[in-house]
Image: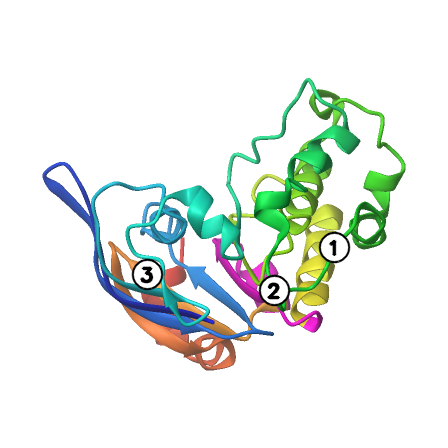
Amino acid sequence: MLDVRHLNVRHGPAQLLFDVSFSANAGEVLVLVGRNGAGKSTTLKALIGLLPDVSGELRFDGRSIAGLTPHEIARRGLGYVPEERRVFTGLTVAENLEVGRIPSRAQVSDAPHWSVARVCELFPRLGEMLDRPGGQMSGGEQQMLTIARTLLGNPKAILLDEPSEGLAPIVVERIAESVRALKREGLCVVLSEQNLTFARAIADRAVVIERGIVRFAGDFAVLEADAVWRDRYLAA
């Protein structure tokens, strides 16, 4: 579903990513893990077309997305949930969800079809507050709303940037349940994460990034079982 080969990202004179390569499949959860500043969020932003100085081979659903704009990539079925959430605080929950249902973003063939009713089944709390302004929601509720809004574009794959950051444990478990549900729907899920407890609950495979370089790519269980890898690249 998603194939990344020799991804390099520069910001002015500084190089942020160095020949990053990995793949992710439909019905799979791939977690990018590493310390703060390792390059995880940069990788996701490069995939969705938000960074200007990017090189390498980026293929999604069998077609190249290298050089496309974010809206062109979204129309092909790649959804993105940013770390900052970016809820429209002056709009209600229902109005925020409508933003994700713009027809130009929703016509993706062979993708699961999402409606407001379905995302409210995934996140029942949203169904209880459809008339509430986004600015009056908690951080966890805003995270649920941002994921739901992205799903209403009917993506075939979704990128989640630090979805558990700053959330209470009970909310983190709700987000984990939703990610597992997306996997069952056949979506390809790629997320960046520092919370290993959360990653452990959802991940099939992991990519460890350190200083912009892939240090490990493989089954999450293999990473977990190797204390040397954990201590070297994941310890705080």
Which residue is located at x 40 percent, y 73 percent? 23
For marks 2 and 1, give the CA distance: 13 Å
Q: Which residue is mark 1?
A: 114
Mark 1 and mark 3: span between their CA atoms?
Answer: 33 Å
Is residue 200 part of the magenta span, yes or no?
Answer: yes
- Callout 2 touching callout 3 (CB < 8 Å): no
Q: Secondary structure at mark 2?
A: loop
Which badge, 1 or 3, comes first in the chain's sequence? 1
Q: Position of residue 26 (x, y in %)?
A: 56, 74
- The kind of residue on which mark 1 rests is Trp
Q: Position of residue 38 (x, y in %)?
A: 31, 51
Nearest to N terminus: mark 2 or mark 1:
2
Asked which secondary structure carries label 1, the reply is loop
Identify the residue at horizontal 78%, vertical 50% (top origin).
115
Quarter-of-image position of residue 112: bottom right
Asked whether residue 173 is drawn in magenta, I would say: no
Task: Name the one closer to the observer, 112 or 163.
Answer: 112
Of badges 1 and 3, nearer the viewer stands 1
| Residue 210 visible (yes or no) | yes
- Label 3 neighbour load within 10 Å: few <14, some 14-19, many 20+: many
Indicate the secondary structure of the residue bearing disc 3.
strand
Of the two numbered discs 2 and 1 in the rendering, the one whose residue sits closer to the viewer? 2
Please, which residue is most extreme toward the top here? 90
Identify the residue at image location x=39%, y=61%.
234
The boundaries of the magenta stretch are 184-201
**Mark 1: few/some/many CA within 10 Å (<14, 14-19, 20+):** some
Q: Which mark is residue 109?
A: 2
Q: How is the image coloured?
A: rainbow
Hey, what amino acid is under mark 2? Ser
